[in-house]
Image (cartoon, rainbow, N blue to C red):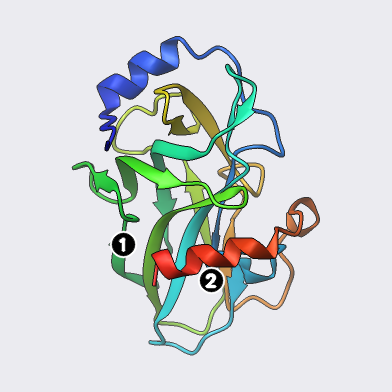
Amino acid sequence: MIRLLPLVILAALAAGASAQINHPHSEVGIYTVPDPVGCETAQITVAPFTLFDAYVVLTDPYNEQRDRPVTTVGGFEFSLQVPSSVFVLTANYPPGCVGFPPPPPDFITGCDAPVIAGAAVLMTFVFMPTTTETVFFHLGPLQTMAPSFPGQMAFADDDGSLHIMHPVSGSADVPVFAVNWDGEMSFCETIPSRDASFGAVKALYR
């Protein structure tokens, strides 16, 4: 069953959620593949006006109240800051998710998104840069509406409990994805290699 989590419900749940998820649990990033291994795919080099796919992936979602891993993501909320020199051509929620009205850069949904090998694809984007210059993407709390946790992103377990979702970079002020950058993402050392079996999720999002 799809669990719809409009902001009013998310906020009510947040009031009863006192524990904050600690790293390395419940980190979210942007990658060029739906099954990232390490952080090499958190950046890409492309020519101007070249389309590429990118995936918002939540890794190791954890239910602190019940002290157990999350097996199905029941909803989420975040904002995506995309440079003005990059067009967002499509933004798709995975099967089983229903998006709510807030305009970009905010994304809110209720869903039944499976966690496979410790990770869940939350959204799939198609981007097109219009420049050869380096640009960075950021994930952070809602901008057009009040976030469920002040200054934080959030996701829900399928039991209705709400939890903080951390940017893999460690802060909303630090980018999670880069285009046309010859450096290395600052958080590379913090991302463990994931089980290759997560590749099975690819078929769900192509």
Residue 3, percent from left and from top: 29, 32
Q: In this rendering, does residue 114 appear at all?
A: yes
The residue under label 2 is 32
Q: Amino acid at mark 1?
A: Ala
Q: Amino acid at mark 2?
A: Thr
Residue 18, percent from left and from top: 55, 12
For residue 114, the mark is none
Quarter of the image with the C terminus in it: bottom left
Element under disc 2 = loop
Q: Residue at x 34, y 14 (%)?
A: 12
Contact between labelled residues 2 and 1, with CB atoms less than 8 Å apart: no
Q: Residue at x 75, y 59 (%)?
A: 193
Q: Residue at x 31, y 62 (%)?
A: 91
User: Is residue 111 rendered to the left or right of residue 116?
Assistant: left
User: Is residue 52 rendered to the left or right of residue 100?
Assistant: right
For residue 91, the mark is 1
Q: Which quarter of the picture shows residue 66?
A: top right
Residue 75, percent from left and from top: 37, 37
